Image (cartoon, helix red, strand yellow):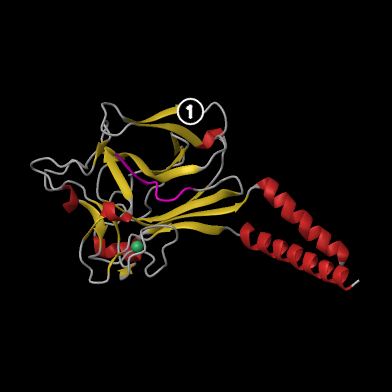
Amino acid sequence: MRKSILSHFVLSGFVGFAGLSAVSQIQGAVVYREIFPVPSDQSNKGWEQAGWQSYYGDDAIPATKKTPTYDQLGYTRVDPSALGLPTDLPAINSNPVISGLEDQSFFYAGNGSGGTNPLNNVKYFIWTDEYEVDRSVNEVDQISWYQGNEAKTDEDRVAIRIGSQWYVSTAVFTQSVGVGTKSNFNGKAEQKIFTFTTDKSAWNELNFTADSAGGLSIGAALSADLPSGNITAFGLYTNKKTATFRFDTYEISTVPEPSALGLLGLGGLLLMRKR
Ligand SMILES: [Ca+2]
């Protein structure tokens, strides 16, 4: 008898916990946050160390590919010389754990005003594969970031990779107010939120083969909804970057996948009946 009561208590407690857990996850759990941190001494830091890669132009040229006249790192970096937005948030599943990193910075890609920077009037693609989103239990809820582009008309899009295929959102995100200087990023950067959907109308294929002729372009519209499968990489894409591009605090949140949610909901219902 004692054992039976104990089992009942344990079961109720578990079901109750599952129910509470479902409620909290429905609101969206942040599974990834990139803050583009810098060392506490505020020294400049190569963006590669944040675990991201960037490519530009029709030929998907890696930004690490230097030319004799062009120091890439000087134009594309994690910028600690002005505040990001927000500041002082913890990283989640991003960046190696290095002591002394602070969230006082953001990602910066310049506009080529010096005449030697090719990052002007070109396609621009920045992404990371440092975290994999498991969609079998939790589906993506939203992807958000703070952007502070200099040109209000530059159009940023969400990019994700499922398996080996890249996709880019049909939705574009522009600035209400352009951010012309780095010191304005903290005050004027705007949070952009992409509400995740697998609907085929929300995505195009993104053709991407690094460092290859014609290796970067928006591809075909989808004939079916996005497939299942983990998101193995993600980032931002712009089809024409005309001026300085800055962004920060890239986040992915998830909610329980519908079938998992159904099980949790059933658990909550059972608990209510027992009471
Ligand atoms: Ca930051």
Residue 82: image quadrant is bottom left
Rendered position, 30 above or below 209: below
Residue 183 location (% of width, % of height): 25, 65
Q: In screen coordinates, is 107 left or right of 28? A: left
Viewer-proximal residue among 100 and 204: 100
| Percent coordinates x, y for residue 28 in the rendering | 58, 58
Residue 127 falls inside the magenta stretch? yes
Circle 1 residues within 10 Å: few <14, some 14–19, many ≥20: some
Give, as a three-letter code, the residue at label 1: Ala
Report the span colored magenta.
Answer: 124-132
Please tell me how many numbered marks the rendered image carries: 1
Q: Quadrant for ligand 1?
A: bottom left
Please tell me whether residue 123 belongs to the stretch shown in magenta: no
Give the image quarter of residue 215.
top left
The furthest residue to the bottom: 2
Q: Residue at x 51, y 29 (%)?
A: 222
Beta carbon at label 1 within 8 Å of ligand 1: no
Point 28% across, 55% down: residue = 49
Q: Which residue in the protein does label 1 denote?
A: 221
Can you say which quadrant of the picture contains the N terminus? Answer: bottom right
Q: Is residue 217 above or below residue 174?
A: above
Q: Secondary structure at mark 1?
A: strand
Tell me if 199 is positioned left or right of 176 in this view: right
> Horizontal placement of 24 versus 251: left or right?
right
Is 23 situated above or below 161? Answer: below
**Residue shown at the point (74%, 51%) measured from the top left:** 263
Foreground of the two, 58 or 229: 229
In the rendered view of the protein, which quadrant contains the C terminus? bottom right
Residue found farthest to the left: 68
Q: Residue at x 21, y 44 (%)?
A: 64
Instruction: Give percent across and percent down for residue 116.
Output: 11, 43
